[in-house]
Image: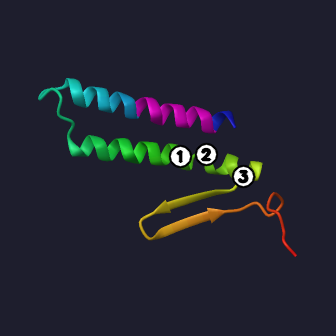
């Protein structure tokens, strides 16, 4: 569990650093689209790093991107209706 928190923290801090650098480096106040793409990818990988821990805990979660949807359900927590 600590490993996933560490990786998420690393990706989050790197993403924040990129945004701050994008604002400070000339031309100031303009963030290049490539920086925004890198931030999105870093945060996406940080979120994906949490999946093994969520699966191990038995947490239900859904990931949606465009037409793709991934849903993980824990049948032990769901109420069954007869």
Q: Position of residue 7 (x, y in %)?
A: 55, 36
Q: CA distance from mark 1 to mark 2?
A: 5 Å
> Which residue is tagged 3?
59
- Dominant SS of magenta comes to helix
Q: Nearer the viewer, mark 3 or mark 1?
A: 3
> Which residue is tagged 2?
50
Q: Residue at x 13, y 27 (%)?
A: 26
- The quadrant in which residue 4 appears is top right
> Which residue is tagged 1?
47
Q: Nearer the viewer, mark 3 or mark 2?
A: 3
Q: Do callouts 1 and 2 mark residues in contact (Cβ within 8 Å)?
A: yes
Label 3 neighbour load within 10 Å: few <14, some 14-19, many 20+:
some
Residue 46 as seen in the image, left or right of residue 16: right
Residue in front for this viewpoint, 2 or 69: 69
Q: Is residue 2 above or below residue 75?
A: above
Magenta segment, which residues?
Answer: 4-14
Q: Residue at x 44, y 71 (%)?
A: 67
Q: CA distance from mark 3 to mark 2?
A: 11 Å
Residue 4 as seen in the image, left or right of residue 55: left
Q: CA distance from mark 3 to mark 1?
A: 14 Å
Of pointers 3 and 2, the one earlier in the residue sequence:
2
Q: Position of residue 29 (x, y in %)?
A: 18, 29
Q: Position of residue 18 (x, y in %)?
A: 32, 32
Q: Position of residue 62 (x, y in %)?
A: 59, 59
């Amino acid at each position: 569990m600590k490993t996933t928190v560490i990786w998420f923290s690393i990706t989050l801090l790197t993403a924040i650093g990129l945004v701050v650098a994008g604002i400070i480096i000339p031309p100031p106040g303009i963030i290049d689209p490539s920086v925004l793409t890198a931030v999105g990818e870093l945060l996406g990988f940080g979120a994906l790093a949490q999946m093994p821990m969520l699966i191990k805990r038995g947490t239900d979660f859904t990931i949606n991107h465009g037409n793709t949807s991934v849903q993980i359900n824990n049948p032990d927590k769901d109420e069954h209706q007869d």
